[in-house]
Image: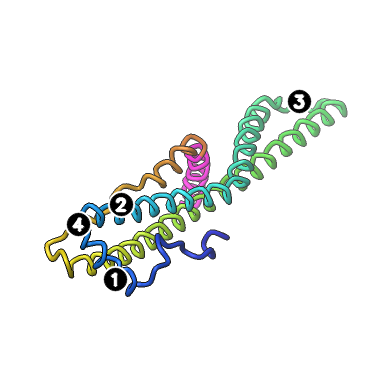
């Protein structure tokens, strides 16, 4: 995926030594100034995470669109296959031709079903891969942001030795919004993909 190759964004481009110096200077104005700056960095982090989710969403848009069409085709072809007439007794040439036509129609529906399932299964793999990459990138982004903030705090503590800030970032708002936006479609895709795997496992047994 292109997302995987893109450079990880930072909450600030300021180097560690400058952040320590800034922390020391800001501390002279009190903890409210320090808290405000850390708050801005965390807000920037939230914005960057949302941007990451949006990039993943855009990249997987064609995949989801293709899968959605295949889901519709799969439903239609399953109905069409079930409606295909059974063979009739081949008592004459006409009956033989009718059975051949019905057999050809059934084969056409089966091929369409196989093609749809392949597209949906492939989409499921791409969506899972996209989510894995998104989670990894956001995790890396948070680690780098925490490193920057801790460098700033180390400067703050030169003037405010008892200063402390809770940097436990537990919420995954960007990922949750991303998942909610596609939950219904992704669950439908996943169901077809996993049902197919189950059928293959049963066949192997």
Residue in the image at 75% along x and 25% along y: 88
Q: Is 149 left or right of 83, judged from the image as shown?
A: left
Front of the two marks 1 and 3: 1
Q: From the top left corner, tell me how far across and down residue 103 is, in percent.
A: 75, 35
- Secondary structure mostly seen in magenta is helix
CB under 8 Å between discs 4 and 3: no
Q: Secondary structure at mark 2?
A: helix
| Residue with the mark numbered 2 | 39
Front of the two marks 2 and 1: 1
The circle drawn on residue 89 is 3
Answer above or below: position of 110 versus 90: below
Please tell me which residue lies in front, 166 or 136: 166
Residue in the image at 76% along x and 30% along y: 102
| Residue with the mark numbered 1 | 21
| Residue with the mark numbered 4 | 30
CB under 8 Å between discs 2 and 1: no
Q: From the top left corner, tell me how far across and down residue 125 is, in percent.
A: 52, 52
For label 3, the crowd category at 10 Å Cα-Cα, with few meaning under 14, some 14 to 19 and many 20 or more, is: few
Front of the two marks 2 and 3: 2
**Mark closest to the chain's N terminus, 4 or 3:** 4
Name of the residue lying farthest toward the front: 29
Q: From the top left corner, tell me how far across and down residue 104 is, in percent.
A: 77, 36
């Amino acid at each position: 995926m292109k997302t995987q190759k893109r450079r990880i964004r930072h909450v600030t481009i300021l180097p560690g030594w400058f952040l320590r110096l800034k922390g020391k200077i800001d501390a002279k104005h009190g903890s409210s100034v320090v808290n405000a700056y850390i708050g801005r960095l965390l807000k920037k982090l939230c914005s960057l995470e949302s941007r990451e989710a949006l990039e993943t969403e855009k990249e997987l848009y064609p995949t989801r669109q293709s899968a959605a069409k295949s889901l519709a085709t799969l439903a239609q072809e399953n109905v069409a296959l079930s409606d295909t007439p059974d063979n009739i007794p081949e008592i004459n040439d006409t009956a033989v031709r009718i059975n051949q036509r019905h057999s050809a129609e059934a084969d056409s529906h089966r091929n369409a079903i196989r093609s749809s399932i392949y597209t949906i299964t492939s989409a499921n793999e791409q969506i899972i891969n996209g989510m894995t990459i998104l989670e990894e990138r956001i995790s890396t982004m948070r680690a780098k942001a925490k490193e920057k903030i801790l460098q700033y705090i180390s400067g703050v503590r030169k003037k405010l030795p008892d200063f402390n800030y809770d940097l436990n970032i537990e919420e995954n708002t960007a990922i949750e919004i991303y998942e909610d936006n596609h939950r219904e479609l992704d669950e439908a895709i996943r169901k077809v993909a996993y049902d197919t795997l189950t059928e293959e496992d049963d066949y192997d047994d």
